[in-house]
Image: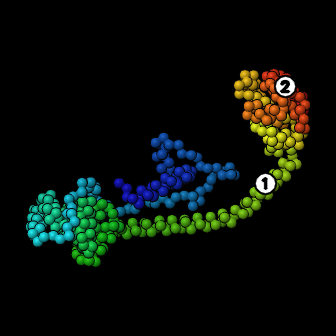
Amino acid sequence: MMDTEKLEDLKHFVELCKENPSILQNPSLTFFKSFLESLGAQVPPSVKSEQGGEEHHDELDEDIIESDVELDNTDIVEPDNDPPQQMGGFISEVTDENRDAAQISKAKALDAISEGKLDEAISHLTEAILLNPTSAILYATRANVFIKLKKPNAAIRDADAALKVNPDSAKGYKVRGMARAMLGLWKEAASDLRVASMIDFDEEIAEILKKVEPNAHKIEEHCRKYQRLREEKKLRKIERDSQRRQAEPKSANEKSKKKEQQSEHEASDPDSASDLNYGKIVGIHSVSELETKLNAVSKASRLAILYFTATWCGPCRFISPFYTSLPEKYPKVAFLKADIDEARDVASRWNVSSVPAFFFIKNGEEVDKVVGADKNSLEKKIAQYAG
């Protein structure tokens, strides 16, 4: 299993990919991109810049991918997943009788250890712990047997219990350091073994540290290196954000000038006025909205056609697709549309008595109209008045 720190790094990387999938186009991630595609994933192409070229990733856009650390893992074992061993309950005071009985069980355990009967030793030590759960040495001794059985997780549980009883237990730190080394937790193992050595130095701790410390140093240097890179990246990001903020007022000023120029252009060129909405059908829902549109059309000296329809009207359904196609053919004519049931005030103002009805309007005045679904008459009049 991956350790918690690596899992967090992986989660962070996945979030970066979600926010900016184009980072997967980075050549250094080709292996990961190929893996995703082999599972059927579709990796989006690189984002195009406003100039039309591919976006160039600088160092800030790339996540820092940590390299592997070459460690000596020859004595690492698979984690043991046995149910937790029995622990002694809380006892404020142990009787002399129980303390003596615990010592007898401990002596039996030591005899079993000398004979290589490790499981039997575990049983005797468990019995001793239940009799005297206030003894840190009993937990540490059983932890040491679990080390011999290559059960580091069980050893760590006992070492934790020993240190809870006696925070200065050298044997508790020693066996926990040994167990952590068996799991490849080199930094943690080195820390425990160094503490144990300071409390009560022995040659065995020194020998274990000779193997553990080189791995721990490599990991510590690796962490310092990438922490430094992340800090440098953070500083560059702060600098880039500062430059961006300084550039924003200039960009906003340029946008404002561009907008003013566009407004001036629209004022001088009626055909560009956004109110006219040439090239599409414009829905009308109120008298005020209609007057606004007609005023814009009048200023441009163009033709407007006001089409009255209703959802229940069969002839309207027949001619509506034809009417919808006309803006593309006559792009300088304003095509308006009002439903007599939704815009009753508009229908009343124009005295609509039958639908479909098409009113031809120029300079704010009605110049002609067509009542009924007569495609030919409608288009002839458009051609007549739109010229």
**Where, by quadrant of the figure, is residue 87 drawn?**
bottom left
31 to 324, vertically: above or below: below
**Residue occupying the point 31% across, 67% down:** 189
The residue at 21%/63% (across/down) is 89
x, y (%) of residue 7?
A: 42, 56
Which disc, if any, is residue 56? Answer: none
Query: Which of the two discs, 1 and 2, labels the residue nearer the N terminus?
Result: 1
Quadrant for the C terminus in the image: top right
| SS class, disc 1 | helix
Where 228 falls versus 299 (above or below)?
Answer: below
User: Foreground: 316 or 6?
Assistant: 316
Q: Secondary structure at mark 2?
A: strand
Residue 242 percent coordinates (x, y): 64, 66
Question: What's the CA distance linking mark 1 and mark 2?
Answer: 41 Å
**In x, y percent, where is residue 356?**
78, 25
Residue 325 showing in the rendered view? no
- Nearest the eye: 290 or 105: 290
